[in-house]
Amino acid sequence: MLSSSGNYTCESSCPAGTFLHTSTSTCITCSPRCLSCTSATSCLVCNSSFVLFQGYCLSSCPTSYAPSNGTCIKCPSSCRTCLTITHCISCQLGLILVNGSCVSPPNNCTNGYFLNSQSTCQQCFPSCLTCSAGNSFNCLSCFSGYTLSNGVCIKDCNTN
């Protein structure tokens, strides 16, 4: 076969960084980003500053993929974007991000908290035992010593 330098040699395979062009029986140099390839458009291993994605060497992985050992790996299905295959950055619709994981939001919150529009538990106004929002006019029930009146917890007169 003919090497990329133009010299004929009797080799059984092409040297590293080249591939065999079958119709001409010549060794062709891979793309500069590739360490190993099977054609001009199909890398197998990339240079260290690039990551492999579907046969191409890219400077970074596309959205919904994360680098792992020089290759772009699909993020977990719950992640919209991820830093690694075990650390989400953003979540699919309907899920919330908790310590790098995408989880279903809580169905309800403990007393003194309400489920906000980001599907996380947020503290009620201090006098509310339960509430539908964080201000003083959205109380649903009150702590002992308070009476509920039109969504507001009012301190009882006979308590200190």
Image: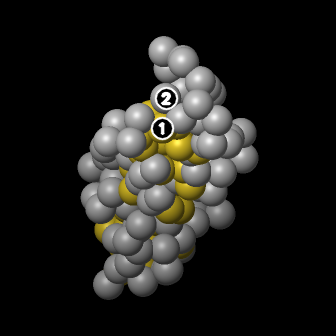
Q: Nearer the viewer, residue 44 or 124?
A: 44
> Disc 1, disc 2: CB below 8 Å?
yes
Task: Write down the residue under mark 2.
Answer: 1
Location of residue 66 in the rendering, given as x and y in whole percent from the top left corner: 52, 45
Q: Does residue 1 appear in the picture of this structure?
A: yes
Task: Write down the residue under mark 1.
Answer: 26
* Marks 1 and 2, how far apart at CA: 5 Å
Q: Secondary structure at mark 2?
A: loop
Location of residue 68 in the rendering, given as x and y in whole percent from the top left corner: 56, 33
Residue at left 57%, top 66%?
126
Residue at left 54%, top 18%?
10
Q: Amino acid at mark 2?
A: Met
Residue at left 45%, top 59%?
63
Direction top: furthest residue = 12
Q: Amino acid at mark 1?
A: Thr
* Mark 1: few/some/many CA within 10 Å (<14, 14-19, 20+): many
Looking at the image, residue 80 sits to the left or right of residue 26; the answer is left
Compared with 16, 156 (above or below) is below
Q: Secondary structure at mark 1?
A: strand
Residue at left 64%, top 35%?
7
State which quadrant residue 20 falls in. Answer: top left
Q: Does residue 81 appear in the picture of this structure?
A: no
Where, quadrant-wise, is the C terminus in this rendering?
Answer: bottom right
Compared with 130, 73 (above or below) is above
